[in-house]
Image (cartoon, coloured by chain):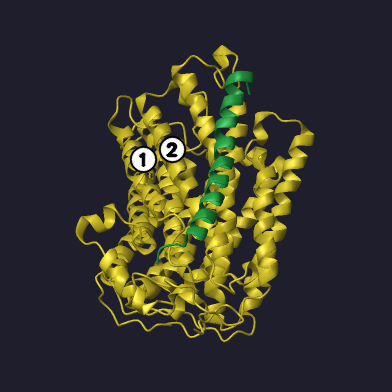
Chain colours: A yellow, B green
């Protein structure tokens, strides 16, 4: 892959030392290069390839769900298999696609953006990635075990999880491994950012992508162990005669929900904050202005992260909590819209009177702001206890979180891919194809998920394979939209990703975007295998190398 | 370039501290639940 070919010496690279270095640790070739990878760029590439593969698998499951829902009645799958599809779609997308993809971005970009030679713990970085492969295999193996894959929903609620077959055990182990991988990745990112920044790169001069990832990594360390604890208790309930969540033994299934959502709500921000970081880099580059309100962006991101710990029970209004509890979680949830609003208005203010152009990265970033904000508004609606009690477990909620996670996380990642892929691969992607990918994705995304608001308001429940006749039209629109959205992503793979990975396209200049600032644009394209082997000297803004 | 011994030590210290936090959150939470209930 041209994305990772060796390249002439980069700024901050010690020539004499380089000679010795290449003799001592020559770049490995063949399968050894990937299996024993310690280079952050190689590991980043592996993360991104893994995540995209999981995205296609999870997407295929989504299309099977939409196929069944194309018509009322049961056409292709029985309800048990349908529930396995919804569960596995959620688990694969959250733990296999979105989270690893952002770690891939972090691996590629954070060392280059802060002027570090590599991640702090290069071998642990390798282990973090390779743990994902057995985890993914264990997760997917559920379909082939007696009783089929887990069908308790991605939230793995008890007591359903206590009644599932062997696949629940393999899924729990898979989540343990993925959690361990995430924790190791987070430790690596925090240590790299705090200890390995180039002299002059103070925290408040750091690119926003590094800031959002630093905060995300702290969130991960705080909540992944909680999930691990909860699913381990599920495991002991299943096999070791405990009754944490088993009502038959005096356990409390609602307690599982509290623990799960103490993890689950920060998890939502784990999946969106790095996308905020990407958009905060792309918008200034294409508006040709500095980011408006950098400091407030940092504090807003931190506020969102802190508030994410005190809102978990807004997922549980219908479990019978006291009204005072509902009020607390309702107001706390609404409070998150304040720092989120700060971010959205800062992006808009950055664009205000900017000299804007709309290449693919900017299209995705603007698309992100537009559609993510819609998901934010429906989130506010869902935060209100009296309304949410009506909307709980309907398609309105499905529409809401897909507006946040697809239009948020995924659109943010696409923006990042188009923005940084010239640096990764050394070639420019085809701009027309990038625009086709954006517009088809935007239109078909809305075609898929916008009708779900109406379905939810009319009372269509989620995770049910059948529905009454009156819901047919909107379901058919959603299914057609879903199929076309999926085809857009196949187009992206075949006509954009594969060509640039093969090095086909115009050679990319060192700084392909006129308004882009940051240390990643101070190295040639493609980025050399080793960058910033000696700490670079930075200018006052910490965006340029001066020696 | 390999990390200097000083940087390596500094990294290791912070890494172990963060790992301990994760371990205490996870194992501590689970152990507390096992011994004293949730």
Q: Is residue A213 visible?
A: yes
* SS for callout 1: helix
Q: Quadrant of the N terminus of chain A?
A: bottom left
Closest to the observer, A361 or A450: A361
B27, above or below A270, in the image: above
Q: Is residue A34 left or right of residue A241?
A: left
Q: Is residue A38 left or right of residue A121?
A: left
Q: Is residue A133 left or right of residue A459?
A: left
**To which quarter of the image does residue A202 belong?**
bottom right
Badge 2 sits on which subunit?
A
Numbered tag placed on residue B36 in the rendering: none
Residue most extreme to the front: B5
Q: Position of residue A72 (x, y in %)?
A: 40, 39
The 10 Å Cα crowd at callout 2, few under 14, some 14 to 19, many 20 or more, is: many
The reply to whether the C-beta atoms of the residues labelled 2 and 1 are less than 8 Å apart is yes
Residue displayed at 33% across by 25% down? A147
As measured in the structure, the alpha-carbon distance from the residue carrying label 2 to the one carrying label 1 is 7 Å
Q: Position of residue A362 (x, y in %)?
A: 49, 75
* SS for callout 2: helix
Q: Earlier in the sequence, mark 2 or mark 1?
A: 1
Closest to the observer, A452 or A397: A397
Residue displayed at 32% across by 53% down? A53
Residue at the disc numbered 2: A175
Residue displayed at 26% across by 68% down? A23
Residue at the disc numbered 1: A135
Q: Position of residue A479 (x, y in %)?
A: 39, 51
Q: Is residue A459 visible?
A: no
């Amino acid at each position: 892959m041209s994305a990772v070919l060796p390249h002439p010496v980069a700024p901050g690279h010690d020539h004499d030392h380089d000679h010795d270095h290449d003799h001592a640790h020559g770049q490995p070739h063949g399968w050894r290069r990937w299996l024993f990878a310690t280079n952050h760029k190689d590991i980043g590439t592996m993360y991104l390839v893994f995540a995209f593969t999981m995205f296609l698998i999870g997407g295929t499951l989504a299309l099977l769900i939409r196929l069944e829902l194309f018509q009322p009645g049961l056409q292709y799958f029985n309800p048990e298999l349908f529930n396995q599809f919804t569960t596995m779609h959620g688990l694969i997308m959250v733990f296999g696609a979105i989270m690893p993809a952002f770690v891939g971005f972090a691996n590629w970009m954070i060392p280059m953006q802060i002027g570090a030679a590599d991640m702090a713990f290069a071998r642990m970085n390798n282990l973090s990635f390779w743990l994902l492969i057995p985890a993914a295999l264990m997760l997917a193996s559920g379909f082939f075990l007696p009783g089929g894959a887990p069908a308790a929903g991605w939230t793995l609620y008890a007591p359903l999880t206590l009644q599932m077959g062997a696949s629940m055990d393999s899924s729990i182990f898979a989540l343990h491994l993925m959690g361990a991988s995430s924790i190791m990745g987070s430790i690596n990112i925090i240590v790299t950012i705090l200890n390995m920044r180039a002299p002059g790169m103070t925290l408040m001069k750091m690119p926003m992508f590094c800031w959002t990832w630093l905060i995300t990594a702290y969130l991960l360390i705080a909540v992944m162990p909680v999930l691990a604890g909860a699913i381990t208790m599920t495991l002991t309930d299943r096999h070791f005669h405990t009754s944490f969540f088993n009502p038959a033994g005096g356990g409390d299934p609602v307690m599982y929900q509290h623990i799960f959502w103490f993890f689950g709500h920060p998890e939502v921000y784990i999946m969106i904050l790095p996308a905020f970081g990407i958009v905060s880099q792309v918008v200034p580059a294409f508006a040709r202005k500095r980011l408006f309100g950098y400091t407030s962006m940092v504090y807003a991101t931190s506020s969102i992260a802190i508030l994410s710990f005190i809102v978990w029970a807004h997922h549980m209004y219908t479990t019978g909590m006291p009204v005072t509890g509902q009020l607390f979680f309702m107001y706390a949830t609404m409070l998150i819209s304040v720092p989120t609003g700060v971010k959205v208005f800062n992006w808009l203010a950055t664009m205000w009177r900017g000299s804007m152009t709309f290449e693919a990265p900017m299209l995705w970033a603007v698309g992100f702001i537009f559609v993510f904000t819609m998901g934010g508004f429906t989130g506010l609606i869902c935060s209100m206890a009296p309304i949410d009690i009506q909307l709980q477990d309907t398609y309105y909620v499905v529409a809401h979180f897909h507006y946040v996670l697809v239009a948020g996380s995924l659109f943010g990642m696409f923006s990042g891919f188009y923005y940084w892929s010239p640096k990764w691969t050394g070639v420019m992607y085809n701009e027309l194809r990038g625009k086709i990918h954006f517009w088809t994705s935007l239109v078909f995304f809305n075609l898929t998920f916008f009708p779900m608001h109406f379905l939810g308001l009319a009372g269509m429940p989620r995770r049910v394979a059948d529905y009454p006749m009156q819901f047919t039209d909107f379901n058919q629109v959603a299914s057609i939209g879903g199929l076309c959205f999926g085809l857009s992503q196949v187009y992206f793979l075949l006509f954009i990703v594969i060509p640039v990975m093969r090095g086909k396209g115009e050679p990319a200049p060192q700084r392909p975007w006129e308004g882009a600032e940051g240390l990643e644009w101070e190295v040639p394209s493609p980025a050399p295998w080793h960058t910033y082997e000696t700490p670079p000297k930075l200018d006052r803004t910490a965006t340029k190398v001066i020696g | 370039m390999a990390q200097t011994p000083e940087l390596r030590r500094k990294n290791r210290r912070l890494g172990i501290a963060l790992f301990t936090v994760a371990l205490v959150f996870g194992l501590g939470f689970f152990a507390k639940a096992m011994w004293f209930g949730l």
